């Protein structure tokens, strides 16, 4: 952050990025129905930059593939994320960044939710849910 603002988590643990998804010929064929899956959603959000650090959400372990749930048939996407510290003031911004990225990338039929996986302050989760509901779908 600039302007002399002190970072809330000055020394975050940095995790290794997972490998890229291997695409098959069927994945690239526009004539074949390819349902949206957990990995596709993870690939969309993994490279979102953290608001405090020049690192991706994946590198900070804020988003993990196994916390992404997709039901293509019912058009639901649920992303659980873990802020790097329990009292993270940037958690709302991270949740909104995930929501906006998915709104811009997915077909309109999808209902999106992003929630905290671990938090000691449930009010952040309630606030985030209220903010997400205010965004147009």
Image: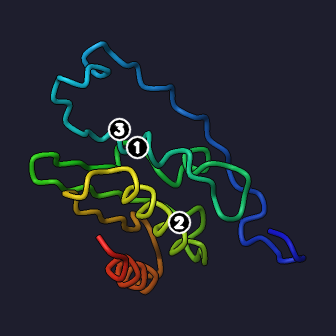
Quadrant of the frame with the C terminus = bottom left
Q: Residues within 10 Å of mark 1 (few under 14, many from 20)?
A: some
Q: Residues within 10 Å of mark 3 (few under 14, many from 20)?
A: some
Q: Is residue 136 left or right of residue 124?
A: left
Identify the residue shown where x is 46% and y is 72%: 119
Q: How is the image coloured?
A: rainbow
Q: Residue furthest top?
A: 25
101 to 88, vertically: above or below:
above
How far apart are the alpha carbons under marks 3 and 1? 5 Å
Q: Quadrant of residue 125?
A: bottom left
Quadrant of the frame with the N terminus = bottom right
- Helix or strand or loop: what does disc 2 sit on? helix
Determine whether label 2 and label 1 are within 8 Å by CB.
no
Task: Identify residue for label 1.
Answer: 42
- Of 64 and 85, the residue lying toward us: 64
Identify the residue shown where x is 16% and y is 54%: 75
Identify the residue shown where x is 26% and y is 52%: 107
Going from N to C along the chain, the mark reached first, 2 or 1, is 1
Task: Identify residue for label 2.
Answer: 94
Q: Is residue 76 left or right of residue 97?
A: left
- Helix or strand or loop: what does disc 1 sit on? helix
């Amino acid at each position: 952050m600039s302007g002399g603002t002190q970072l809330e988590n000055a020394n975050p643990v940095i995790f290794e990025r997972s490998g890229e998804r291997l695409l098959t010929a069927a994945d690239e064929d526009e004539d074949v129905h390819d349902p949206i899956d957990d990995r596709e959603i993870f690939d969309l959000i993994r490279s979102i930059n953290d608001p405090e650090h020049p690192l991706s959400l994946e590198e900070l372990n804020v988003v993990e593939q196994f916390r992404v749930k997709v039901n293509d048939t019912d058009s639901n996407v649920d992303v659980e994320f873990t802020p790097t510290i329990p009292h993270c003031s940037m958690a709302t911004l991270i949740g909104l960044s995930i929501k906006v990225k998915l709104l811009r990338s997915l077909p309109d039929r999808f209902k999106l939710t992003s929630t905290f996986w671990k938090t000691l302050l449930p009010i952040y989760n309630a606030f985030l849910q209220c903010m997400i509901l205010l965004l147009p779908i």
